[in-house]
Amino acid sequence: MKARAFAYARPSSLAEAHAAFAGADGDASYISGGQSLVPALAMRLQAPQVLIDLCAIPEMRGVRLDGETLRIGALTRHAETLTEPLIRTHAPLLTAAAPFVAHPAIRNRGTVGGSVALADPASEFPAMMLAMGAEMEISGVDGMRRVAADDFFQDLYQTAIEPGEILVALHVPAAGPRHVCAFDEMARRRGDYAMVGGGILAERDGAIIDNPRIALFSVGPTAVRARNAEAEIAGKALDADTIAAAQRALDTDIDPLDDVEIPAAMRRHLARVLLGRLLRKLETCS
């Protein structure tokens, strides 16, 4: 199939982008990397009157350190999270997750903001926003607002972004010298959607883990914070008993559904195994 006919707009500012959306009476779609939208257009799952290309808007580009916060423009490509020194230094969990995102051709075109705004429950970057405690900078006709990652992901492919609003940037608390992180996922083949995956960001004081944030994906309709598992490891050394307690607590954090590929019970088992791997990685990383 081919996409239905549509008009094309390439605004050079957020104001122009909002005006284009309003001019289409809301029958418009924003596009950045297009790695999810273009297939949807081709299959006619989406058929907007106007396609609004955001790639020429300067406010959505660039990576910079603002005090203790790293601002990552929504148009930052997946591949840039592997090479950008500021991201590697201050958001190492993104760098750890990036090689698992699809394949190089997709990483070279797809954008971090596009992935987060789509909120695919099997995608790596939305979960990492939860693990890092990020805030989303969102532009609307009434100005800018910020939404914490914990409040941003609401349901399957549903976020706090209202119709016509644009995800402009991601604000990540900069990791410091005490921070350690770990990422892993289980997939049938490298580049496939994960059967289960997750990441951890924490502070470490000697053998003691403080302020852990654990986020999992492919375990429900949205990325999930494993708060009960976090509570089991906070303020403790990661010995075998602590890891086992966190794995047991994980059962109360996730509620996977049965699907045609993986039964819920199997996904729960894989999540427990994955958490054990992540915690052992965290124990040894520097």
Image (cartoon, grey):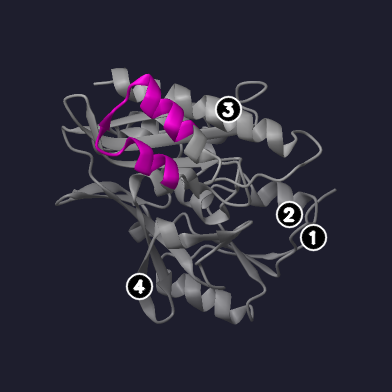
Q: Which residues are magenta?
A: 228-247
Principal secondary structure, stretch drawn in magenta: helix
The label shown at residue 41 is 2
Label 2 to label 4: alpha-carbon separation? 29 Å
| Residue 4 numbered tag | 1
* CB within 8 Å, label 1 to label 2: yes
Q: Position of residue 218 (x, y in %)?
A: 61, 40
Would you say the residues marked 4 and 1 are in contact, meaning their CB atoms lie under 8 Å apart? no
Amino acid found under the numbered disc labelled 2:
Leu
Q: Which residue is mark 3?
A: 103
> Relative to residue 61, is residue 231 depicted above or below?
above
In front of the other: label 4 or label 1?
4
At which x and y percent is residue 266?
Answer: 69, 31
Which residue is at the far top? 284
Where 90 sits versus 58, above or below? above
Indicate yes or no whether the magenta region holds residue 244: yes
Give me the residue at 51% from left, 48% from top: 224
- How many angstroms separate mark 2 from mark 3 (CA)? 21 Å
Q: CA distance from mark 1 to mark 3?
A: 28 Å
- Please state the horizontal and vertical placement of residue 135, each as a whole percent of the image: 35, 58
Residue 194 visible? no
**Spatial separation of the CA atoms under disc 4 and disc 1:** 33 Å
Q: Earlier in the sequence, mark 2 or mark 3?
A: 2
- Residue designated by label 4: 144
Between circles 1 and 3, the one closer to the viewer is: 3
Which mark is first along the chain, 3 or 1? 1
**Residue flagged by tag 1: what amino acid is it?**
Arg
Tell me the residue at 57%/51% (across/down).
222
Q: CA distance from mark 3 to mark 4?
A: 33 Å
Crowd band around label 2 with a 10 angstrom C-alpha radius: few (<14), some (14–19), many (20+) = some
Tell which circle, 1 or 2, labels the residue nearer the N-terminal end. 1
